[in-house]
Image (spheres, helix red, strand yellow):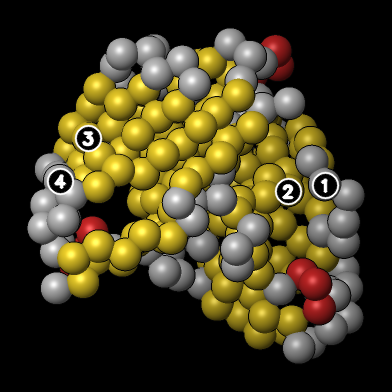
């Protein structure tokens, strides 16, 4: 069974204080690892897909990295508008084309001005 | 570009009343469609998915049902709501663009059963 564990559950940072969110996973035959941002009361917004160990992707102050067991979402010099819940999900190749990902419970990030 | 619409955004329903949440996708054909429920502190729970018209797979036995009457339409229903059905419901679809098989979500529907 695929498993995704995100840590910490909650993180409070001061504006400009860089940090990382962790996503540990267990999956047979990783097809992709996804990161999403979710604001309160809204649907998750897609950020990145990572496909293989060693891959990195960046978007503004966010950088996602991937190893064979975990992924990190690095936040450099965060701003209050980066406050949100960040979700990680893994997807493995399945027969039948269902492509269902397994989600973690998320990390709630609050950035104080 | 592809978009996903979900409605209603918010609803308050009494226990025992019926439910219908609707989701449509534009700008693509034959998408995989999904219904998730998100309860506070419990993450995303997959309820149903569909790989084509009339094809529904249920992940969790419960008081809800789903239907796909058209290629880009996905409906979540209940004949009699329970208090435990309260939550945030999300419709989603698979995009097969440059990002591979990425799931994209709608804005969600808040359901409160009273």
- Quadrant in the picture for the N terminus of chain B: top left
Proximity of marks 3 and 2: CB atoms separated by less than 8 Å: no
Instruction: Residue under label 4, please give it.
Output: A76
Proximity of marks 2 and 4: CB atoms separated by less than 8 Å: no
Secondary structure at numbered mark 4: loop
Proximity of marks 3 and 1: CB atoms separated by less than 8 Å: no
* Residue B110 circle label: none
The correct choice, above or below, for B11 with respect to B89 in the image is: below
Q: Residue at the spot x=50%, y=44% of the render?
A: A6
Proximity of marks 4 and 3: CB atoms separated by less than 8 Å: yes
Tell me if mark 1 has few (under 14), some (14-19) or many (20+) residues whose alpha carbon lies within 10 angstroms of its own: few
Check the residue under mark 4 and report the chain it is in: A
Tell me if mark 3 has few (under 14), some (14-19) or many (20+) residues whose alpha carbon lies within 10 angstroms of its own: some
Q: Residue at the spot x=60%, y=54% of the render?
A: B43
Proximity of marks 4 and 1: CB atoms separated by less than 8 Å: no
Q: Earlier in the sequence, mark 4 or mark 3?
A: 3
* Residue B47 circle label: 2
Q: What x and y, as percent, mark residue B70?
A: 64, 41
Instruction: Residue under label 1, please give it.
Output: B60
Q: Nearer the viewer, mark 3 or mark 2?
A: 3
């Amino acid at each position: 069974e695929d498993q995704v564990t995100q840590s910490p559950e909650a993180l409070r940072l001061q504006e400009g204080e860089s940090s990382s969110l962790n996503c540990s996973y267990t999956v047979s035959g990783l097809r992709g690892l996804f990161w999403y941002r979710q604001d309160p009361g809204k649907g998750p917004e897609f950020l990145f897909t990572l496909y293989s160990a060693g891959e990195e992707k960046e978007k503004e102050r966010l950088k996602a990295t991937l190893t064979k067991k975990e992924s990190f979402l690095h936040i450099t010099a965060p701003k209050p508008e980066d406050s949100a819940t960040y979700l990680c999900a893994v997807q493995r190749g399945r027969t039948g084309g269902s492509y269902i990902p397994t989600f973690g419970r998320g990390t709630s990030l609050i950035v104080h001005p | 570009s592809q978009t996903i619409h979900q409605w209603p955004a918010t609803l308050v329903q009494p226990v025992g009343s019926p439910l219908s949440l609707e989701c449509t996708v534009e700008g693509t054909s034959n998408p995989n469609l999904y219904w998730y429920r998100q309860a506070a502190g419990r993450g995303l729970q997959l309820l149903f998915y569909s790989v084509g018209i009339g094809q529904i797979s249920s992940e969790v036995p419960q008081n809800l049902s789903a239907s796909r009457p058209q290629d880009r339409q996905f409906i979540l229903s209940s004949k009699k709501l329970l208090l435990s059905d309260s939550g945030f419901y999300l419709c989603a679809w698979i995009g097969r663009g440059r990002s591979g098989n990425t799931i994209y979500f709608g804005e969600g529907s808040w359901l409160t059963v009273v």
